[in-house]
């Protein structure tokens, strides 16, 4: 079949530039236009046009520097919900055993996050949502962190009533993470114990309480591009502040394991780029699955439009060491912002700790190793050694 003018590489390159200029000019792309950027073949030369312009949009809206945040589990495992990808659901038989962290351990993890340069530090709990008693338990940590003012206190606690959202804001929490996870159409196929509407309600309750919103999803769960566009447009309508992009690296024992094909690195980068075109002003945070799915291409996340990433470990799997990520930023010539917005040049030698198991190590392995050596709380029987990469987020 003859190639039409609109299918030629030159036309496609010009069209990508035209759409990028529209975004740079401050106009949102329509659903039809979103479909055009999503249709670029990730194995074509024009794919690099897409990345080039996504990077231009990132720099125009967010500058050259990036942010990163760190999370730690407060309450792990034993969850009543049945999210198909999650190793913490009690419906799944995985390596995770239920456990709860003490306030002292949260503080220790927070100091490690600070030492790695994270601007935000989040406590992530499994379960439907917090009880009053759980909020009582976390309150001293959040209050102290807010008073110290060195890192943004964040919470991923599941579903929030208007009252609980207000209470969190009152104890100093600045930002709540609650992902949509998937499109409204796809959501029922990944979870049956709560609905997409439940998730939207929590986001609305948190917003109404004056909390900043971090909400995104997990990609590679069998969704199609129409689902991805739907979710981006829903996040745009909800006007969230930060959009985490997680790539599924499925965990043995979860319902989804073995039922979906892992994303290829170029498709993962295309997801970031399309989200940058659709959500130009939002912080795009590349989170779970970065190491496993992107492999050697993970340093391309910024070129694809990512403006932020999760440093250190994920919830039930290891990430890279902060040293490795600082080295990546240094090699790229990318600096980062602290909580007070001070811009800092990445320097792996300035990050405490020499790697897994080292004395006084800060960041990635520290949380796990020190908790293990503390002998009190540890439940994370990690199936693979350090650098195993993350298999999606807690999902909330
Ligand atoms: S993603 Fe969150 S709500 Fe769903 S099973 Fe895991 S811990 Fe529970």
Image (cartoon, helix red, strand yellow):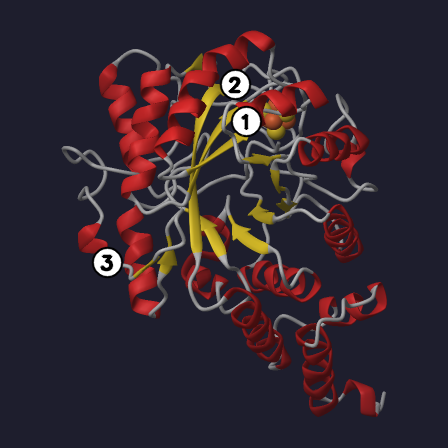
Which mark is drawn over residue 77? 2
Q: Residue at x 84, y 90 (%)?
A: 4
| In this view, 335 is above or below 59 | above
Residue 91 spot, x, y in % from top left: 63, 17
Which residue sits at x=48%, y=64%? 302
Residue in the image at 64% along x and 45% along y: 216
Say what secondary structure mark 2 lies in: loop
Q: Is residue 161 visible?
A: no
Residue 87: mark in rendering: 1
In three-dimensional space, the C-alpha distance between marks 2 and 1, rounded to whole angstroms, equals: 7 Å
Q: Is mark 2 within 8 Å of ligand 1?
A: no
Marking on residue 13: none
Badge 1 density bin: few <14, some 14–19, many ≥20, Cα 10 Å:
many
Label 3 lies in ligand 1 vicinity (Cβ under 8 Å): no
- The residue located at (30%, 55%) in the rendering is 326
**What is the C-alpha distance between the residues marked 3 and 2?**
35 Å
- Residue count near mark 3 (Cα–Cα under 10 Å), binned few <14, some 14–19, many ≥20: some
When asked about the image quadrant of residue 150, the answer is top left
In this orientation, does residue 24 appear? yes
From the image, state whether disc 1 or disc 3 is nearer to you.
Answer: 3
Query: Which of the numbered marks, if any, corresponds to residue 347?
Result: 3
Between discs 3 and 2, the one toward the N terminus: 2
């Amino acid at each position: 079949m003859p190639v039409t003018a609109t299918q030629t590489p030159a036309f496609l390159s010009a069209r990508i530039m035209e759409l990028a200029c529209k975004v740079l000019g401050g106009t949102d792309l329509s659903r039809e236009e979103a479909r055009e950027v999503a249709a670029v073949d990730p194995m074509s030369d024009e794919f690099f046009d897409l990345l080039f312009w996504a990077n231009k949009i990132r720099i125009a809206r967010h500058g050259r520097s990036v942010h990163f945040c760190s999370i730690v589990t407060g309450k792990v495992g034993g969850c009543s919900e049945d999210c198909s990808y999650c190793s913490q659901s009690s419906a799944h038989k995985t390596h995770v055993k239920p456990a709860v962290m003490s306030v002292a351990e949260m503080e220790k993890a927070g100091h490690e996050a600070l030492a790695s340069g994270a601007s935000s530090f989040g406590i992530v709990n499994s379960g439907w949502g917090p009880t009053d008693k759980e909020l009582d338990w976390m309150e001293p940590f959040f209050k102290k962190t807010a008073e110290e003012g060195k890192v943004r206190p964040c919470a991923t606690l599941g579903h929030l009533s208007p009252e609980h959202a207000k209470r969190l804001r009152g104890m100093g929490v600045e930002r709540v993470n609650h992902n949509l996870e998937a499109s409204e159409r796809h959501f029922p196929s990944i979870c049956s114990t709560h609905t997409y509407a439940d998730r939207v309600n929590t986001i609305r309750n948190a917003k109404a309480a004056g909390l900043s919103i971090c909400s995104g999803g997990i990609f590679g769960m069998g969704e199609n591009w129409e689902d991805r566009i739907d979710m981006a447009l829903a996040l745009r309508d909800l006007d969230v502040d930060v959009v985490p992009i997680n790539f599924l690296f499925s965990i043995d024992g979860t319902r989804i394991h073995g039922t979906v094909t892992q994303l290829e690195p170029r498709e993962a980068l295309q997801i970031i780029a399309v989200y940058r075109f659709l959500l130009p002003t939002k912080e795009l945070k590349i989170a779970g699955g970065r190491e496993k799915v992107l492999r050697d291409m993970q340093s391309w996340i910024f070129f694809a439009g990512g403006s932020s990433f999760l440093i250190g470990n994920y919830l039930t799997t290891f990430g890279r060491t902060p040293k490795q990520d600082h080295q990546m930023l240094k090699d790229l010539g990318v600096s980062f912002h602290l909580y007070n917005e001070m811009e800092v040049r990445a320097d792996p030698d300035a990050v405490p700790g020499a790697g897994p198991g080292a004395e006084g190590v800060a960041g990635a392995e520290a949380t796990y190793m020190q908790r293990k050596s503390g002998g009190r709380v540890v439940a994370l029987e990690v199936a693979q050694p350090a650098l195993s990469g993350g298999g999606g987020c807690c999902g909330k």
